[in-house]
Image: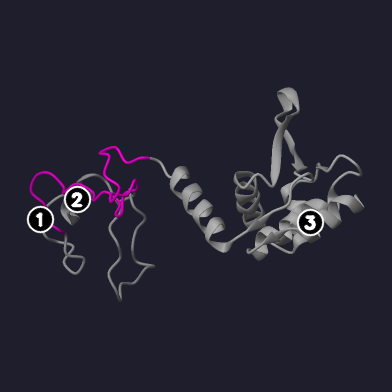
Amino acid sequence: MSKEARTWAARQRVADQTITAVMRAVAWAADKGTGQCRQSQSVLAVEAGLTDRSVRAALAVMERLEIIVRRPQSKGKYGRATDVILLALDRNFDISRAAVTAIRLSLKTSLQPESPSGSKKTRNRKLLPLQPEAPSGEYNPVDPEDPYQEGENTYIERLDQGERPLPTEGADLAAVTPWGSA
């Protein structure tokens, strides 16, 4: 904890509460004398009382405003480590709400991919899933009420294929001989 970083953060005037909260959380976690913070975004989110997504967006805006400088850290073949966040302790800021909004809008548009046609009004995602193709050939639905109708797998064709017939209602099951014996 650096007292110098905390007093610096208290002097800054930023007209956005999210950025102010993240800036104070970074200052609270900064190392003494260097102004470097090595905390993860999730830890900063807990310290600031915000969500990870809000902290991530605020850090991007703070980097554009040059309040902080982020240096990515690597763990070699094991992936990335948390970024080192360096506070600009030598500068003072008085940032208006309009400047923050303009930077947020520029970040939002720069992160969206270009449409293939070059038009800004089109969307890059499909609004509706593709419809399945219509069945080819003649389609005759089978009426479940009439199992004796003609067509594929009718009652008579199933008997010819060796399927066991269903007993009729009210039939004496004791009198029915097992299928295949006679």
* Magenta highlight range: 114-141
Q: Nearer the viewer, residue 50 or 158?
A: 50
Q: Position of residue 22 (x, y in %)?
A: 72, 56
**Residue at numbered disc 3:** 9
Q: Position of residue 156 (x, y in %)?
A: 16, 53
Tell me, for residue 153, which label it has, or none. 2
**Residue at numbered disc 1:** 150
Q: Is residue 32 left or right of residue 126?
A: right
Disc 2 + disc 3, Cβ < 8 Å: no
Image quarter for residue 87? top right
Cα gap from disc 2 to disc 1, whole angstroms: 8 Å
Q: Residue at x 75, y 44 (%)?
A: 88
Cα gap from disc 2 to disc 3, whole angstroms: 80 Å
Q: Nearer the viewer, residue 33 or 22?
A: 33
Q: Which of pointers 1 and 3 lies earlier in the amino acid sequence?
A: 3
Mark 3 Cα-neighbour bin, 10 Å: few <14, some 14–19, many ≥20: many
